[in-house]
Image: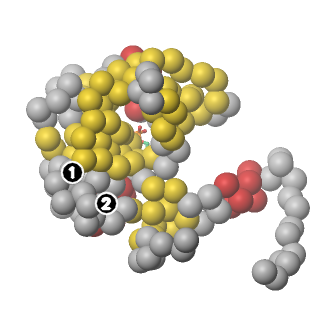
Amino acid sequence: MSQKLVEAYSVTDPYALRAAFGRFATGVVAVTYEADGVRYGMTANSFTSVSLDPALALVAVKRTSRAREFLETGHYTVNVLAEEQLDTGLHFAGRPGGPEVEWVTTGRSPRIAGALAYFECEPWATYDGGDHVLVVGRVTAFGEGSGAAEAAPLVFFEGAWRRLAAGACA
Ligand SMILES: Cc1cc2nc3c(=O)[nH]c(=O)nc-3n(C[C@H](O)[C@H](O)[C@H](O)COP(=O)(O)O)c2cc1C
């Protein structure tokens, strides 16, 4: 494998840091919740599975986001977005304009139809994450969307929405 030049940057350069963090390819989730009878969502790629027993999952939530106080105190659902749900990812990142979000409201918190998987969560713990809060939720229910076996995930890499290349590399 060829040795490429690796550039070092100052950790006080947030733009360079964001770009370097962005080299970690992730899936994309929409965290959905209901407050005062209104359904909301927040697009996130900081979702991480944490523990199987107890079942715990983490999302790093920006302190200034509307979602923060609701996720710290109430029930919410983490929806793993499919490639075809790019509109939903944009919508809950503050860029509405696509088709209406299709909600499923049979659980303790609202979720999005057609997600690859969903995890209903209740508050477990929160931790200081600098300009974010690390919200750990206990998974109280979960499932996989119908057709999940065939569905492709929405991917985020280097600041762009991507699709997963077909085929395993090992
Ligand atoms: C791909 C992508 C990933 C994001 N990941 C996060 C994240 O992990 N945590 C976060 O707080 N915001 C994240 N955001 C930004 C939020 O989606 C955005 O700030 C949103 O408008 C917050 O909504 P709210 O203020 O209604 O809660 C992400 C945005 C995009 C496009």
Query: Please, is residue 115 above or below residue 119 in the view?
Result: below
- What type is the residue that disc 2 sits on? Ala
Disc 2 marks which residue? 82
Q: Decide if residue 169 is in sight here.
A: yes
Residue 38 percent location from the top left of the image: 20, 31
Q: Decide if residue 159 is in sight here.
A: no
Query: Please, is residue 96 above or below residue 134 in the view?
Result: below
User: Is residue 142 rendered to the left or right of residue 45?
Assistant: left
Furthest residue in direction front, as rendered: 170
Mark 1 or mark 2: which comes first in sequence? 2
Q: Which of the pair 3/135 is nearer the observer?
A: 3
Q: Which of the pair 123/52 is nearer the observer?
A: 52
Callout 1: SS: loop
Mark toward the viewer: 1 or 2: 1
Residue 20 percent location from the top left of the image: 71, 59
- What type is the residue that disc 1 sits on? Gly
Residue 154 percent location from the top left of the image: 39, 62
Q: Quadrant of the C terminus?
A: bottom right
Disc 1 marks which residue? 145
- The residue drawn where x is 27% and y is 36% is 142
- The residue drawn where x is 51% and y is 18% is 125
The reply to whether the C-beta atoms of the residues labelled 1 and 2 are less than 8 Å apart is: yes
Residue 35 percent location from the top left of the image: 26, 25
User: Is residue 124 rendered to the left or right of residue 133?
Assistant: left
- The residue drawn where x is 33% and y is 66% is 152
- The quadrant holding residue 150 is bottom left
Callout 2: SS: loop
